[in-house]
C-alpha cells in the first residue's frame, strides 16, 4: 500500500490521460470526489494536441472544486513519475486500427469471435502488443516511484496485470474495470425499475467474465435476485440474449453483459453474430467527441449545438456521452478515484469488483493470478472480500480464461510463436488447427512493428 496517510494529499500520475474514453472519465471522477482537492494530478500523453485540450479541461475543474488541485501535463512520463503515490495506466496500441485487424483477420480464418478485443484470437494479439508496452512503463515506475500503487485500466486487463505481477518489480497492482457497474446502471436498473444507486451488487470471476452472485436493495437488504430473474424472463427480444441464456442454463447472470462475457463463450456467436463493431462509425464518434472536448475547453461548447452539427448522439453508450460534462454523477467512471479518496480520508468504501492477485478470495480459482471480486478500502489499504467457491460450471469458464492468460503472458514476454499457437488453439472460438496456424503467422507478420520480440 502506498505510504500516503489521511493527512496527506496524494500525487497521482495518469499515463495515457488524453485518451478518448478514459480521459474524460478521470476529470468527471475528480469532480465526483472533491475530498481529493489539494492533490497533485500529473497528466501524461504522447499526443500533444489532445493533451493540451485535456490540460485546459483539467484547469477548469478548479472552478468547481472548493480546494483546487495542482495540475502538471507532459509528454514524458519520466518527468512526473518521481514522487507519485499512485500511477494510473490507460494506454493502447493502435486502438481502432489494430482492433479492426484483430477482428477481421481471425474471422477470415474461421474464428467465431464476436468482437476480437479482449477474447478470441483478436484479444490474444491485443495482449501481445499491450504487455511489452506496459512492462516498459513498469520499469520506469520501478525506478522512479517503486512504492506507488499501480492501477491498470488498459485492456486486456487481467493479462496485463498478470504480466506486471510476474515480470515487473512493482508495489501493489490493481486492475480496475467498471463492467459490473455498467450492467447495474445501464441495463439492470432499467429492466428492474430500480435506480442503480439503490442496489448493491456482488460479482466475481475474472475480468470481463464475472458473475452476479448477489443483488440487494441497499436500504433494506432485500434479495433482488428473484426479481432480476423474473424481469429478465419477460424480455422477448434479442436484448442481452446470450446473458439471459447463461442465466437460464447456469442460474447466474454475467456481470458484464453479452459484449464482454461473449468473448469467452464458444457459442456466443449464435446470439451476437460475427459482425464486430462499426469501426468506421466509432472512429467518427471519436473525432466528434474530441471536437466537443476541444470546444468545451475553449468555452464554446453546448450539447444541443453539438448534436445539431454531428447528429443525434443517443446511440452512444451512456458511459461515453459527454453531457453535461461537469455535472456530478452518482457512480464512479474509473474506480480509481473512489479508492484514492477513501484511502486519503480514511473513509470506508466498498467496491463491487476489483482485480487483485488471488490470495484466496475465490477459493476454487488458482492462487497468484488476477481475479475480480469485491473489495473494501480505507486509510489502511485495500482488501479483497472472500467469496469462497464459485459455482463449479462458472469456475470452469474462468479457469479456461486463466490458463490461456498464463500462456499469453509467457508468449508475449519470451517472443515464443509456439506459445502463441498453444494459446490460440485453447480459445473456444476456433476450430481448425490448420487455419489457426496460418492465422497466427499472418497476424505475427501484420503486427511485426509492435512485436519485435518475435523477430
Image (cartoon, rainbow, N blue to C red):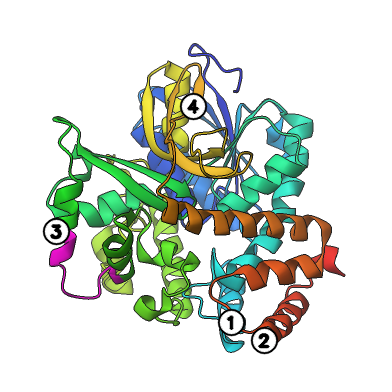
Do residues under tags 1 and 4 come within 8 Å of each other at their CB atoms?
no
Do residues under tags 2 and 1 come within 8 Å of each other at their CB atoms?
yes
- The residue closer to the viewer here, 178 or 426, is 426
> Where is mark 1, residue-wise?
431
Q: Earlier in the sequence, mark 1 or mark 4?
A: 4
Which quadrant of the structure image shows residue 426?
bottom right
Q: Earlier in the sequence, mark 3 or mark 2?
A: 3
> Where is mark 3, residue-wise?
231
Q: Which residues are magenta?
A: 231-241
At mark 4, the secondary structure is strand
- The residue closer to the viewer here, 9 or 69, is 9
Q: Position of residue 351 (x, y in %)?
A: 39, 35
> Where is mark 2, residue-wise?
435
At mark 2, the secondary structure is helix
Q: Residue at x 38, y 53 (%)?
A: 296
Q: Is residue 450 left or right of residue 192?
A: right
For the residues marked 3 and 2, what is the alpha-carbon distance in whole angstroms?
42 Å
Which quadrant of the structure image shows residue 289?
bottom left
Q: Residues within 10 Å of mark 4 (few under 14, many from 20)?
A: some
> Where is mark 4, residue-wise?
383
Amino acid at each position: 500500500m502506498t505510504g500516503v496517510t489521511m493527512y496527506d494529499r496524494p500525487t497521482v500520475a495518469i499515463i495515457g490521460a488524453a485518451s478518448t474514453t478514459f480521459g474524460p472519465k478521470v476529470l468527471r471522477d475528480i469532480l465526483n470526489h472533491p475530498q481529493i482537492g489539494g492533490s497533485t494530478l500529473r497528466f501524461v500523453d504522447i499526443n500533444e494536441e489532445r493533451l493540451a485540450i485535456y490540460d485546459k479541461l483539467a484547469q477548469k475543474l478548479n472552478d468547481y472544486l472548493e480546494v483546487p488541485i495542482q495540475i502538471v501535463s507532459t509528454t514524458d512520463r519520466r518527468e512526473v513519475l518521481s514522487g507519485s503515490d499512485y500511477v494510473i495506466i490507460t494506454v493502447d496500441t493502435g486502438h481502432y486500427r489494430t482492433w479492426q485487424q484483430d477482428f477481421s483477420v481471425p474471422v477470415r480464418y474461421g474464428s467465431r469471435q464476436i468482437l476480437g478485443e479482449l477474447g478470441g484470437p483478436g484479444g490474444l494479439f491485443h495482449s501481445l502488443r499491450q504487455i511489452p508496452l506496459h512492462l516498459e512503463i513498469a520499469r520506469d515506475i520501478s525506478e522512479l516511484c517503486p512504492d506507488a500503487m499501480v492501477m491498470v485500466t488498459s485492456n486486456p486487463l487481467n493479462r496485463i496485470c498478470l504480466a506486471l505481477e510476474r515480470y515487473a518489480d512493482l508495489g501493489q497492482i490493481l486492475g480496475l474495470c467498471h463492467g459490473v457497474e455498467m450492467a447495474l446502471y445501464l441495463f439492470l436498473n432499467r429492466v428492474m425499475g430500480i435506480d442503480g444507486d439503490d442496489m448493491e451488487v456482488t460479482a466475481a470471476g475474472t475480468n470481463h467474465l464475472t458473475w452476479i452472485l448477489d443483488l440487494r436493495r441497499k436500504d433494506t437488504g432485500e434479495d433482488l435476485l428473484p426479481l432480476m430473474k423474473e424481469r429478465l424472463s419477460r424480455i422477448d427480444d434479442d436484448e442481452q440474449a446470450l446473458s439471459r441464456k447463461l442465466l437460464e442454463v447456469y442460474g447466474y447472470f454475467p456481470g458484464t453483459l453479452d459484449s464482454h462475457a461473449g468473448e469467452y463463450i464458444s457459442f456466443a456467436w449464435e446470439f451476437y453474430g460475427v459482425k464486430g463493431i462499426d469501426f468506421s462509425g466509432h472512429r467518427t464518434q471519436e473525432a466528434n467527441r474530441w471536437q466537443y472536448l476541444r470546444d468545451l475547453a475553449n468555452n464554446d461548447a453546448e450539447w444541443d449545438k453539438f448534436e445539431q452539427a454531428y447528429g443525434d448522439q443517443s446511440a452512444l453508450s451512456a458511459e461515453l456521452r459527454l453531457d453535461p460534462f461537469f455535472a456530478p454523477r452518482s457512480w464512479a467512471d474509473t474506480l480509481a478515484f473512489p479508492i484514492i479518496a477513501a484511502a486519503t480520508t480514511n473513509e470506508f468504501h466498498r467496491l463491487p469488483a476489483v482485480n487483485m492477485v488471488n490470495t484466496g478470495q475465490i477459493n476454487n480459482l488458482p492462487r497468484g493470478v488476477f481475479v475480480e471480486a469485491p473489495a473494501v478500502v480505507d486509510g489502511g489499504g485495500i482488501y479483497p472480500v472472500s467469496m469462497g467457491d464459485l459455482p463449479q460450471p462458472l469456475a470452469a469458464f474462468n479457469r479456461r480464461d486463466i490458463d490461456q492468460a498464463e500462456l499469453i503472458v509467457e508468449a508475449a514476454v519470451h517472443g515464443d510463436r509456439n506459445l502463441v499457437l498453444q494459446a490460440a488453439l485453447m480459445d473456444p472460438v476456433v476450430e481448425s488447427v490448420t487455419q489457426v496456424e496460418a492465422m497466427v503467422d499472418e497476424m505475427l507478420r501484420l503486427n511485426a512493428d509492435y512485436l519485435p520480440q518475435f523477430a
